[in-house]
Amino acid sequence: MNTLNPNGGPQRLTSQDLIKLKKYLVDNLMRALEMEGVASAHRNTFVKENIVRVFEQTQLKLPEDLKKEIFSQVLNDLLGYGPIQSLLDDPDVSEIMVNGPKKVFVEKKGQLTKSNVVFDDDDHVVRIIERIVLPLGRHVDADSPTVDARLPDGSRVNAVVRPVAIDGPSLTIRKFRKDKLKVEDLINYGSMSRQMADFLQACVKARFNIVISGGTGSGKTTLLNVMSGFIPEDERILTIEDAAELQLQQDHVMRLETKTANAEGRGAVTIRDLVKNSLRMRPDRIVVGEVRGGEALDMLQAMNTGHDGSLTTVHSNSARDALSRLETLVLMAGMDLPLKVVRQQISSAIDLIVQQTRLKDGQRKVTSVTEVAGMEGEIIVLSDIYKFNQTGVDINGKVLGDLQATGIRPNFTPRLEAAGYKLGADVFAPGSVNKSSSRR
């Protein structure tokens, strides 16, 4: 390390010198932690007590503000998640995208912007990725260059390193909301109308099978969380996810999560495995975070054989696209079913498709609520009950439009009434967006 200036004054260090200094402090403190065998509960105190001692060994004299900044970065590297810790602590940041050490982007209030946060170099990014995934028993390297993980608070993490990531290691974090959104929040945000909310609540309670469709980052999981809150307390709910994100508040909830294969390529537990197993666990409701493979067939068969009231999400950009996507996923199950049979399975199993969309200005809205109304020949018939009609864009780039009923009553209205929900004409009347349904 560098030594003091001959006159004893503060030294001027280059950016590379500062990187070396931080690495020196991190390496020495890590070594001290390992040698002392410090328990995880006491790491915080140990590092804060010893960082000054290790720094003094360098015999460097730095301005107090610079020294304080370096100490903060070292503490974040050892006890947090490095440079992105401040972004993780920021409640307004919903997503963090590290495209390399000097390109860190964030989504804030629906808008994507470049952050002033930077990493030292590619190795620094990899160290933070390892800090996230190693405690979870996962690893990332040239042989396993991609990994999905979850932070302790539930935030979803995806990391990609070379050789797959050509320009250097990449890290994407979808943050986990600590405050669970309620249906009233979505109404206040303009994500759905009161009509929609009352209609969807009646459909969930009446045990309709519902698919939430949407693109990446559109808010499907958030909407699934809100809608699952309508499930009555006295029902046994099984949730199945790749990475547990759902925050159900009911008491009788069994959460299942997939498991990746071990180093020998064995021991993996897939969504499909869990869907099959869930049928033996006496569920009243099955909630699948997302169908993306052959489990779609098992899910449809469950819906068709007495497991009504199931909820799931699928990646697609419209209700019609959601059906095409489900057809593809069912065929991935390897059962070699005729397309007409697949469509019959879908049309008889699914009652409703709720389309969630992230608009160009960052707003997230339910843009359609569509009934799966049966089949005509070999085509599944869809009927929009509610629709978002865009009317323009204001001077600030905000998308303008109305969330309104189309005026069409769903064919399954008698089933709703049989379940105890009588929806008045106002619920389906175009233009009346703030009316609520009444329960009989």
Image: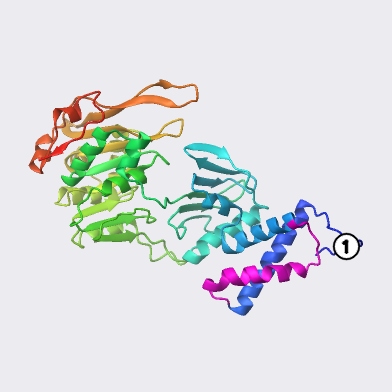
For the record, the magenta segment spans: 38-64
**On the image, numbered disc 1 is attached to which residue?**
8
Which residue is situated farthest in the right direction here? 6
> Quadrant where the N terminus lies?
bottom right
Q: Position of residue 390 (x, y in %)?
A: 37, 23
Residue 56 falls inside the magenta stretch: yes
Q: Identify the element where label 1 is drawn.
A: loop
Residue 167 appearing in the image: yes
Q: Main secondary structure of the magenta part?
A: helix
Task: Using residue 430 as the reference point, say whether residue 398 is left or right of it.
Answer: right
Going by the image, does 46 lie left or right of 294? right
Q: Quadrant of residue 152?
A: bottom left
Query: Does the magenta-highlighted stretch encompass residue 1?
Result: no
Query: In this picture, is 407 found above or below 228?
Result: above
Q: Residue at x 17, y 28 (%)?
A: 426
Q: Foreground: 296 or 39? A: 39
- Left or right position of 112 against 267: right
User: Which of these two is toward me, 401 or 102?
Assistant: 401
Percent x, y of residue 321: 32, 34
- Residue 182 place in picture, x, y as percent: 32, 45
Task: Identify residue type, mark 1.
Answer: Gly
Seen at 64% across and 53% down, the residue is 122
Q: In the rendered view, would you say 352 is above or below 207?
A: above
Q: Is residue 338 among what the camera can see?
A: no
Q: Quadrant of residue 31?
A: bottom right
Query: Residue 314, position in %: x, y?
Result: 33, 43
- Does residue 274 sit above or below 407 in this rendering? below
User: Is 311 in front, or is 8?
Assistant: 8
Q: Tell me the residue at 65%/46% (across/down).
A: 102
Name of the residue lying farthest toward the bottom: 36
Callout 1: 10 Å neighbours few (<14), some, many (20+)? few
> In which quadrant is the C terminus drawn?
top left
